[in-house]
Amino acid sequence: MYVVRPVEPADVGALETLLAASTPGVHTLPRTREKIAAFVERSVASFAAHVDIPSEESYLFVLEDVDSRELVGTAAIHASAGSNGTYFAFRNDVIQQVSRDLNISHSVHALTLCSELTAYSQLSGFYIRDRDTARREAALLSRARLLYAVLAPHRFGDRFFVPLAGVTDEGGQSPFWDALGRKFFKMDFLDAERTIGGARNRTLIVELMPHYPVYVPLLPGPAQAVMGQIHPSGELAFDLLTEEGFEADEYIDIFDGGPILQAHKHALRSFSGSMVKKVANAELQPPTRGGKAAMVNYAVASSERKFRAIVLPCDPAESSESICLPPAARDALGAATGDSVICVRI
Amino acid sequence: MYVVRPVEPADVGALETLLAASTPGVHTLPRTREKIAAFVERSVASFAAHVDIPSEESYLFVLEDVDSRELVGTAAIHASAGSNGTYFAFRNDVIQQVSRDLNISHSVHALTLCSELTAYSQLSGFYIRDRDTARREAALLSRARLLYAVLAPHRFGDRFFVPLAGVTDEGGQSPFWDALGRKFFKMDFLDAERTIGGARNRTLIVELMPHYPVYVPLLPGPAQAVMGQIHPSGELAFDLLTEEGFEADEYIDIFDGGPILQAHKHALRSFSGSMVKKVANAELQPPTRGGKAAMVNYAVASSERKFRAIVLPCDPAESSESICLPPAARDALGAATGDSVICVRI
Amino acid sequence: MLVIRAITLNDIDPLIEMARQVGSGMTTLKPDRAMLGERVETAVASFAQTIPPEERDYMFVMEDTSNGRLAGVCAIKAAVGLTEPFYNYRIGTLVHSSRELGVFTRMDTLYLSNDLTGSTELCSLFLMPEYRTGYNGKWLSKSRFLFMAQFQHLFTEKIIAEMRGYQAEDGTSPFYEGLGRHFFKMDFNHVDGLTALGKKSFIAELMPRQPLYVAYLPEDAQAVIGQVHRSTLPARKLLEQEGMHYEGYVDIFDAGPVLQGRVAELRAVRDSVLATAEEGQPEGECEVTLVSNTKLDDFRMVLTQACDGGRKVALSVRELQLLHCQPGDPIRSLALNVRKNNG
Amino acid sequence: MLVIRAITLNDIDPLIEMARQVGSGMTTLKPDRAMLGERVETAVASFAQTIPPEERDYMFVMEDTSNGRLAGVCAIKAAVGLTEPFYNYRIGTLVHSSRELGVFTRMDTLYLSNDLTGSTELCSLFLMPEYRTGYNGKWLSKSRFLFMAQFQHLFTEKIIAEMRGYQAEDGTSPFYEGLGRHFFKMDFNHVDGLTALGKKSFIAELMPRQPLYVAYLPEDAQAVIGQVHRSTLPARKLLEQEGMHYEGYVDIFDAGPVLQGRVAELRAVRDSVLATAEEGQPEGECEVTLVSNTKLDDFRMVLTQACDGGRKVALSVRELQLLHCQPGDPIRSLALNVRKNNG
C-alpha cells in the first residue's frame, strides 16, 4: 500500500536520492540537498500556516510505500502562482482574418504574453519513480494535491493550472526557445532555465520577453511543431490531468512552448465528484451486489489537519453514507471508524 | 396559454405593429415593414434549410397568445455570428503590474478588439411587450431558442453569446461611445448604429475601430462607469440569461460598452438540464405526491421539424419517463400522447 | 533639343503611349486612359492653381523639340494619403535589458504606420529607353527639386520618394515571402496590382497590426529591409545627393526604402540661384546647370552651361525660346552635379 | 575673461558646488560626489581618447579667468542607452478610413520606443545665474556644435537633445497626470527621481506597452505634447537655429520634446571655417564669433570678433593664451549668430 502525505523534515535525505533521477528542465524540482531542504522547510511552514488569502504557500506531497517506508514520488501545489511577482504565460489567441473584397477568410494564431494565471493555484513537481508500472499510484499522487485543496479550499484559488514540460531534443535544446526566448535572452535554453530557476514570475521576464503578440505563422516550422506539445516524460501527467478535467490549448509556456493545462475547480473531478463519507469497517460489512467484480478504485483522503491519501478498490459508495476501509487503509489514513473522509473514483 | 413558434410569412403585419414600440439601438430588431419582411423570409428559409455547418442562418421566434392569436414577443438566434464577416467585441483583459523594486502591485484593465466570438451562435432580438408582468412567458421566450438548439445542435455552434444593450442617456447618447467609437467614426452613437444596422461583423469596423488595447484607466469616468452595464430595458433579459448559465464580464460591446454574455453550451441549463420525455395524458394520470403545491414550471418543446414551445406547471418529471400534458398544451405543442418532447425546469 | 515643362492636356495621348512601355513595378503610371486622363487634368489644374494645394499633382514631361515626342515624365504629388490610407512599415528599436542577468538586447521592430500621411511625394519618373543617355536621367529626376526650390511655399515641410524594393533573381521578394504572404495568402504581384487599383481595405483587414520584431523574419527577409531593387540603385543615389535620406520607413510589401527630406534642407533650396536671363555665350569656368523660368503656370526648364555657381547664365536664342523667356526675365539655376566642397 | 574648455580632474570640487545650485529638473547634474566624480573621470578619459568612442562623455566648463571660478558647464554624451534602455514616446500617425462610410480619421499615436538608442546627446547645460548676461548662454550652448564640427568623425550620424517638458503653474505635468500617473501611481517628482538614480526597470514593468491614441488623453495632456517648459523656450530656439528639429519624440513622463539633428547638416558643420590664428586687431566688418583650437586633448574656445565669415581671425595675445595657441596654429571659427542669408 502507498500513501500520499505532506513532506516532513526527515524526508530530505530520501528526497535527495529520489530526485537525483529527475530531469532538469522537465521536472521543476530542486536537486541539491540545500534546495531540497529549503523546499521541505517551506512546505512544512505552509501546511502549518493559518491562511486567509492564498499567497506564497507551497505544499509538497510525497508518495510513500507504507511497507518499506520508501519515498517513490513527489507532487506539489503552490497556493498562488504569482504571489511573488506576475506569472507569465503565452495566451494562444486566434485572430479571424476576413476580407470580403478579396473573398479571403482564415484565422491567424498569435501568442500574447499574459499574466492571467497570476492568481491561479499551480500544480508542479510531479515525479514518480516507476511511472510506467505504477499507474494507479500515479493517479493518486496527482490527485491527492487536489483532494487537499478540496479539504482546504481557503488555501487555494478558484482556478488551477499545471505547466507541463515541452519538447526538447537529446541535447536539451528547445526548438521553441530557439525561435523566441533565445533572441531576447541571448542564451541557451538550459542556461536560461538554470538562471531563472524554472520560475515564470520574475521581473526579468517582463524586461526581456516580447511585449507584442508573436504571430505563429512567422515562427520557424520546428518551433510551430512543438507548440503545446508535451515532453515524452509528461505523457502520464498529461493523461491524468485531462482525465481530471484540465484543459490544454489556451496557454503555453513562454520558454519551451509546453502546454499549460488549466481549469476552474468546478470543472475538476476531484471537486465535483468527491463525496464526504464516514469510515466503516470493511471486515464487518459484507461485500454488496456482485462482489469483487463491481469494485472501483477510490482515492480517499483524510482531513486538512493531518492529511493522508490512499487509493484502494471499494464497493461503489455513491448510495451509501459510509465507505468501508480495511484496517491497513484506516491505519494509512490515520482515520478511525466513524471519522469523515472524502473519496473520489479514480 | 402562450406558445413560442418559428415566425411565419403571415406574421409580418403583426410584427410591424409589435416592433413599433421597440427601442432603436436597444432592441436590435428591424422596424420597417420591408426589413421585417426580409428578416421573416430569411428565418423561414433558415428553418427549412438543410444545414451541415452553421452559417448565415438566422432563426426568428415569436411568442403568441394561443387564444387571441396575438403576437406579444420575439426572440432570435443566429447560427454563426461572423458568418458574414468577423464578429468584433472588446475582450476585457487584466494586466498584472508588479514592480518589486518599487513594491507596487496592481492590475490594469485593457479592452482588446477581438474576434473570438465569430464562430459562436448569437442570441438577439429579444423583445416582449409586457415585460413587467409576463415573467414566466419571458423566460419561455428567451429559453425556447436554446431548446431549439438542443433539438438541432448541428445548426449551431458549441458556444453561445448574447450582447445586451448598454447604457444610453435620454437623448440616446452613449458615454462609452463618446469616449471611444466617436473618436474614430466621427459620428453620433445613434447615427453609427443606424449606419451599421446594429452589425458587429462589418469590414468598416476593422477599418475604423482601434487595433490596440484601450487602457481602461485612460477612459473618462462616465465611460468607465457604464462598461459592462446594461440598459434598464435589458434587466429582464440579463436575469433570465444569467439564470440560464450565461456569464458576463469577459466581453463587452465595441459600440456602447454593454455586456456580452457568453457560455459553452454545457454550462447552459437548457442543455445540461433538459430531459427527453414521452407525452402522457394529464387527465389520465393522477397527481402524485403532494398535489399542486409540488408542481414546477417546465418549458416544453416539441421537435426540430415542427418546433413549438410552451411553459406550464407540471409534476416533477425527473424520475418519470413521461410528462403529463393537458390537451391544450398538447395542442399548442402539436404533440400527441406518446410523442417525444424535451423539457427543462424554468 | 530637350525641354522639361509642365504637362498639358495635349500630352495625354503620348503619355498613354509611354505608359505602355513602363511595364509593371510602377503603380502610378499604368496605361489606363481614364486614370491617366484624370491625372493629367489634375496636373493642369495644379499648375493653374485652380485646386487646393494639398490636392495638386505636378506632372512634368521631357519633350524632344526636334520631333515633338515625349522623352520622359516625372511628378510631384503634393500630399499622399489624404483620401486613402498610405501605409508603411517604420523600423524602430526596442531594447530588452535585464540588469540582473546582464542581458542587453537591442532589437529592430516593424511598426505598421501611416506616419507619412500628408507628405509631398516625388513619383512617376520614367525616361524612354532611347533617351537614357548623357545627363537626361539625372536632369529629369533633379528637375523636380529646382521646381520645389522656386515654389517652396507650395510644399509641405517634408518630401518623400518610394523606392522599389529588392527582388531575387526569380523576381520574388524575400520580404514578402517572409512576411506578407503568411497573411495575404496570395502572390506578390497580385497584391501589388490590388494596391495599384486603389483597393487598399484588405491591408487594414489582413495585415498584422501589432509591432513585429525583425528577428522573427527569415534571414533573407531581414537582409533586404530598406534595400532597393538593383536597377533602382542609381535613382536612390541621385536623391540622396540632393539631400534625401532613408530614415527607417519601408514599403509594407517589399520593404523598399522610402527616402525622406526636409524641403528647407534640399541642395536645390540651399544652393539654387535666382538670376536674370541674358542672351549670349557662356564664358569662363562653367558647369552643367538646370535653368528654369519662374512661371508656375508655364514652367519650363533647359539644361545648359552656366558660370559663377549659376549666378551668370547666358542663354542662346533657342534656349530663351524653350524657356518662354526674354532677356531680363528672372530665371532659377542649379548645378546638375553636387559640388565637392559645398561652399 | 571667459574661456570654454575641456573639463579636468581639478574641476570636480567646483562642479559639485555648481550642481548644488542647479535644483531639480536636470537629472544629469546632481550634487553627488561619487556620481559626478566618476563622470568627470569619464570626460577626462574621453578627451584623452583612452576609452572607446561610444563610452565617451565630453564635458566642457566655462571658466572665469579673472577669478578662476566656473561659470557654467555643458556636455556631449557620445551615445545614450547602451547600458540602460533609453525610453521615449514617438508620435506616429494612424489613419482609420472607411470608404463605405466616407470616414477618414487621422490620429496621432504614442509608441513607447527605444529608437534613439545610440544617439549622441547634448546635455547638462548649466550657467551660473550671475553669468546669465550678454552672449554667455548662447555661446555655452553653441560651443558644443563647434566641437562636433571639428571632431565630426567622433560622432554618430545623429544627435539629440532632451528638453524639459511643459509644467503647469503649480509645477505639475499635465501629461504625467493624464497618462503616467495611472500606471505608476506616484508623484511625478518621485518618478523623475527614480530615473535620475538609474532605476529604470520599473518603466519596463509598469509602463503600458501598447500604442496609445493621443485622443484617449485628457485635452490638457494632449496640448502639451512636444511643448517645452516656459523657461526652456530660449534654449530650444538656440538648438533649432543650429539645425536641430523636433521630429516627434518626447519624454515618456512629461512629453517634453527631443530635438534631433544630423551631424552633417548642422550649421556648425556646414558653415564653420578652419582658419589660421594670427595676432592682431580685427579689421573691417566683423561679427561675434566662436573660435576654438583644434586639439581634442586640450580643447579651448573663446568668443571674439572675426571678419570675412570667420576666415580672418585676428586674436589678441590674451586670446591666444586662452586658446593655448601660437600665431600660425590652426583654429576653427563659427559665427555666433545665424546669418540671415545663408550664402
Image: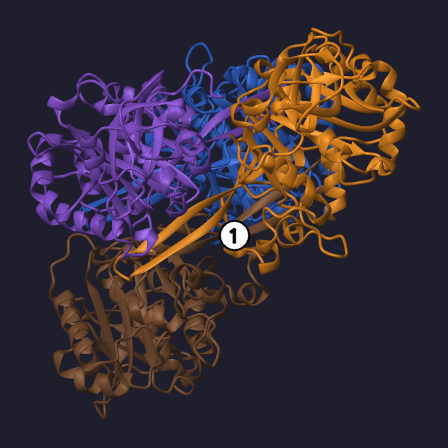
Chain colours: A brown, B blue, C orange, D purple
Q: Nearer the viewer, residue B175 or A217?
A: A217
Identity of the residue drawn at 75% across and 11% down: C298
Q: Which of A87 and C197 is in front in this view?
A: C197
Q: Farthest residue toward the right? A: C67
Residue C272 in which image quadrant: top right
**Amino acid type, residue under disc 1 in the picture:** Val
Looking at the picture, how far across and down is residue B207, in whole percent?
A: 59, 30
On the image, numbered disc 1 is attached to which residue?
C214
Identity of the residue drawn at 45% across and 80% down: A171
Q: Which of C331 and A48 is in front in this view?
A: C331
Tell me which chain the residue with mark 1 is part of.
C
Looking at the picture, how far across and down is residue D74, in whole percent?
A: 23, 35
Viewed as shown, does residue C209 lie left or right of D177? right
Residue C32 higher or lower than C253, as above or below: above
- Give the quarter of the figure containing the N terminus of chain A: bottom left
Identity of the residue drawn at 49% across and 20% down: B182
Looking at the picture, how far across and down is residue B170, in whole percent?
A: 42, 10
Does residue C117 appear in this view? Answer: yes
Q: Farthest residue toward the bottom? A: A68
Viewed as shown, does residue A164 lie left or right of D75? right
